[in-house]
Every structure is written in C-alpha cells, then in structure tokens.
Image (cartoon, rainbow, N blue to C red):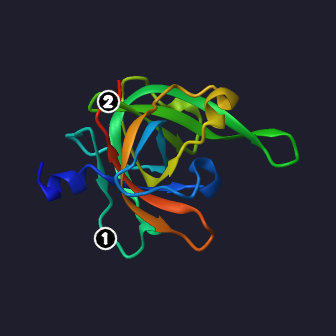
C-alpha cells in the first residue's frame, strides 16, 4: 500500500485523555475500539458510494477536521439526554455499514425519519467511543482494532489520534 492510499484510510479521531491513557505511541495497536461521527445529514447526491473521506478544505488543525461518511443504514435508534429537567430527545444513533464495516454516527432528528437499508451521508467530526458506553447505552458493537499513525495533544489534554484500521488480532 503506498503512502497516499494508507493516508486516505486513516482518520483524525478525538479521544478524551482519561479513556485510553496518555501514554499512547505511534505504531501501537488499540484492540476492540470504535469511533463515531457526530454531525449533520448531508443532502443525497446520486450515485452514492460508501466511503469515509475528509471534507473539503485544507487541514489547518487536526481538532477541526471533518469527514463525510456515506453508508447504508443498519439501525436507527432515538436517544435521550437529561440536563437536569428530565430526559428529552437528543437525536438519533445510527449504525452505518460502510463497505461492510460498521460505524456509529449521531445526528439530530428522530429515528422514525430514517429508513433501514437506505443510503445516508453524515458530515462531522470523529470521536472515540468510551468503553463505558457499550453497556450503558446498549450500542450495536462496531469495535475493531486500530493502529496509531500520529498523536497530537490538545490544549485541554485530550488527544487527536490519526488511526487506521489494523489487521485482525484474532
């Protein structure tokens, strides 16, 4: 795989410092981790090709990079949050199949407006899904192994990791 292809298959992902520790290094493989795109639904433009690509524009800061993720809807579930005044609808968790790989996404609006099997494009930032979320929120398991290509520490001590899918550790 040439450097351009490898770079096209890697993504800047925000990780809260306490989730994976702060001693991560280039070349390390993170087993059984997942990422989520949080953003907005893009208008449908046929033909749709399943993929993850960096949104247009120069990369000035890894923390600001956005991706455009297009896939087929596997599940769509409303979720709630409670900011002190009781649970309220906060958006929809959508699992997308992107060329056979599953990926989490969160978007605004109700799940009832999303058809299972339909194509969906989400534009937003990528973040790491913490281990506590799997049981606490009943998420569909989308974990896999990721290899670290770059590490960038943010001013708030969170990390931006350039990750690429790693070979199976089985």
Q: Is residue 62 left or right of residue 52?
A: right
Q: What is the secondary structure assignment of the residue under circle 2?
A: loop
Q: Quarter of the image for the C terminus: give it.
A: top left
Image coords of residue 166 (percent x, y):
31, 39
What residue sits right under mark 2 in the picture? 168
Q: What is the secondary structure assignment of the residue under circle 1?
A: loop
Give the residue drawn at x 29%, y 65%.
56
Can you tell which quarter of the image residue 67 is in? bottom left
Give the residue drawn at x 61%, y 30%.
134
Q: Is residue 42 left or right of residue 136?
A: left
Q: Nearer the viewer, residue 149 or 112?
A: 149
Q: Nearer the viewer, residue 25 or 5?
A: 25
Give the residue drawn at x 48%, y 30%.
114
Q: Is residue 124 left or right of residue 85?
A: left
Identify the disc placed on residue 27. Answer: none
Image coords of residue 120 (percent x, y):
38, 38
Identify the disc placed on residue 57. Answer: 1
Can you tell which quarter of the image residue 88 is in? top right
Mark in the foreground, 2 or 1: 2
Q: Is residue 32 above or below residue 74?
A: below
């Amino acid at each position: 795989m040439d450097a351009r292809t490898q770079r096209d298959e890697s993504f800047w992902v925000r990780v809260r410092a306490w989730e994976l520790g702060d001693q991560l290094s280039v070349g390390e493989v993170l087993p059984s981790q997942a990422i989520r795109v949080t953003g907005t639904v893009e208008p449908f433009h046929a033909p749709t090709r399943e993929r993850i690509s960096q949104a247009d524009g120069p990369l000035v800061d890894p923390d600001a990079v956005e991706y455009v993720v297009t896939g087929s809807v596997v599940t769509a579930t409303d979720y709630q949050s409670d900011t002190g005044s009781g649970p309220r609808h906060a958006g929809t968790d959508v699992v997308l199949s992107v060329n056979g790989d599953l990926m989490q996404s969160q978007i605004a609006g109700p799940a009832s407006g999303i058809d299972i099997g339909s194509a969906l494009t989400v534009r937003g930032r990528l973040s790491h899904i913490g281990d506590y979320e799997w049981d606490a929120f009943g998420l569909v398991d989308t974990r896999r192994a990721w290899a670290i290509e770059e590490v960038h520490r943010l001013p708030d001590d969170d990390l931006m990791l350039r990750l690429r899918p790693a070979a199976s550790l089985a």
